[in-house]
Amino acid sequence: MRKLLLLLTVVTVGLVFIARLFYLQVYNNKSYSLLDDNAIRKVYDYPKRGYVYDRNGKLLVANQPSYDVMIIPREVEPLDTLEFCSLLKITKEDFKKTFAKSKNYSPRLPSVFVPQLSKTDYAVLQEKMRKFKGFYIQKRFLRDYRTSIGANVLGDIGEVNRRIIEKQPYYKMGDLIGKQGIELSYENTLRGVKGTKFIQKDRFNKNIGPFKEGRYDTLPKPGKDITITIDSALQEYGELLMTNKRGGIVAIDPSNGEILAMVTGPSYNPNLLVGRERNKNFSKLFLDSISKPTFDRGLQAQYPPGSPFKVINALIALQEGVVDTNDKVSCRMGYYYGNRRLTGCHHHKSPVDMNDGIAQSCNAYFVNVYRRIIDNYDDAGNAMNIWANHAKSFGLGDFLNNDLSVGRPGRIPDGDYYDRAYGDNRWGSTYIVSNAIGQGEVEATPIQLANMAAAIGNRGYYYTPHIIKKIEGETIDSKYTTPKYTTIDKRHFEPVVQGMFDVYNKGTAATLRIPGIDICGKTGTAENFVKIDSVKTQLTDHSIFVAFAPKDNPKIAIAVFVENGYWGSRFAGRMASLMIEKYIKGEITRTDMENWILTHSLENEYAKPYSGEPFKINGETTLQVIDKVEKPQNDDLNNSIKIHANRPNPN
């Protein structure tokens, strides 16, 4: 019986071995890889990341060496913990916590124990590393920002996490990856390719030399240098103008879609996110829920576009044939429906045609025009869809399919949107008149408004806004060099362009003219509501301005949005005019405007929700203004009118 049992055991073990060998050699088609061989240690040689230059060849981002202390937990031998912690400038508690974390990740795979040592700390530690078995130093490259501007543009790099490693096996624990800005958008281009050395280990897990005499080792391939479209001088000037203000500035070259400046305020120095203090500094910036310095307002903030949106309604009305440029509309300080005033308006001559409607930013004119567009069709839902398609052809309500790392789509409502809100066939043009003046449900980001201005300056087409200008050894994606056409015929643009030109000549921006430059622009004011102690409160209006220049063959299109900036020409208009002059002339002659902007802060406005100080709108407190807003009396289609404002709009 014992002999039979022994025989069965031998046969069973043999069959198990045979089955396993069959599985590995025949059934399993996974090829052998040195990277998966536990008897081979992999040592990575990290490449230099590609350099970043601005459009004029100025170096913005280079590299600096960094040294990480790596650990392989199962190879760690007893050591003088106090001495080791002293050399690394960490506490014993930090040592225990990090060791446990590394062991939990993998006892046999390397991970970062202490990241990003300085050159001085590395020099001291290197001489004594032989005393600490299981630890070694890994050289990497950190970013060296040669500028203090453009943090939102340039971005930063940081350590990968488990989620990234699971999705992208190229990365290992401790590797660095682009986290924001162009570092994220062009990570694969900038990072290069790691080199790998294979080290043979013996049965005691000790290194015994290169595997196969280094036959399979690879050298690192450095990342490719890139040139971005940003004009660093213009970017720096924009950030200067945005000091003590919140908002976004985006400037685009209409002839090719290249982004010249992309300012967000407030911002921060990109060097804060380099080195061992990166995580602490990032947390401090990210958790600032009041000023939000990591929130790119030029790309992510969705605002009511205000009066600049009126030019879109003018173009749609011309395309739909519901208005002639000579048609005149009376304005009695606002637009009236029956005996109700749906929107207010500021004082100007009356009646007005399209040119004066744009130049004087007449609300009554554009509500009238907007209602003609919607009422031109029997079905309001169908009319809204047609209207929305026209507006979206300017890049509004869309991510724009650009190469930026973040963004928001904005909103252009259509018929389905209002059917969901009011019910099918239960609404009409009087419900949605706020869309006529860029309020209501319409929202846009500053980059979308800048792109809209570029499309108007080009008389009907635009190039996808992008930030890449040149990649070493590569060509730019054709989607950035192919024009996109709007649904508006070219012939309809000229009267609208003339109206925007007259905004500077005789309209709401007449005081902002720049000598020697023909600028076409549009001022805007957007209402600003927040909840304070669960009460919807109207705060100081936002200041908006869009423009392009020169009038013919424009070189720059720009959108400026300043939160709580009162009205369009007060802050945003001045800043836009100065940015245009800075780019075209290279110098500032309107030093009066520049001095005004640099000496006026809005920090007091931003503090009001927390201080309890009342807001003032045209000299009246918020509650006084809200009490004057007319409200619907019943649910009848003709009387249930959606009202957003009943006060003069200075734009």
Image (cartoon, grey):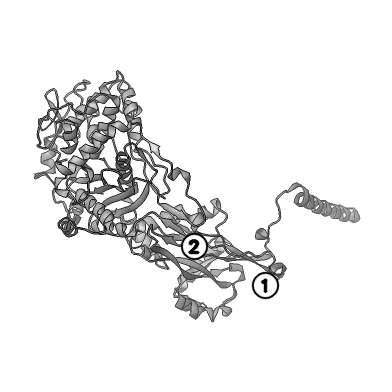
Crowding near pointer 1: few (<14 within 10 Å), some, many (20+)? few
Which residue is more in the foreground, 530 or 413?
Answer: 413
Q: Position of residue 88 (x, y in %)?
A: 47, 75
User: What's the amino acid at mark 2?
Assistant: Arg
**Horizontally, is 283 left or right of 346 in the view?**
right
Secondary structure type for disc 1: loop
**Horizontally, is 2 left or right of 200 in the view?**
right
Q: Going by the picture, which residue comes out furthest to the top?
A: 378
Q: Position of residue 443 (x, y in %)?
A: 29, 39
Q: Which mark is residue 481?
A: none
Q: Position of residue 249 (x, y in %)?
A: 29, 51
Which residue is more in the foreground, 29 or 463?
Answer: 463
Q: Position of residue 82 (x, y in %)?
A: 49, 79
Which residue is more in the foreground, 18 or 563?
Answer: 563
Mark toward the start of the polypeptide (1 vs 2): 2
Measured along the vertical axis of the image, is residue 602 above or below residue 533?
Answer: below
**Which image quadrant for residue 497?**
top left
- The residue identified by callout 1 is 206
User: What's the amino acid at mark 1?
Assistant: Lys
- The residue identified by callout 2 is 49
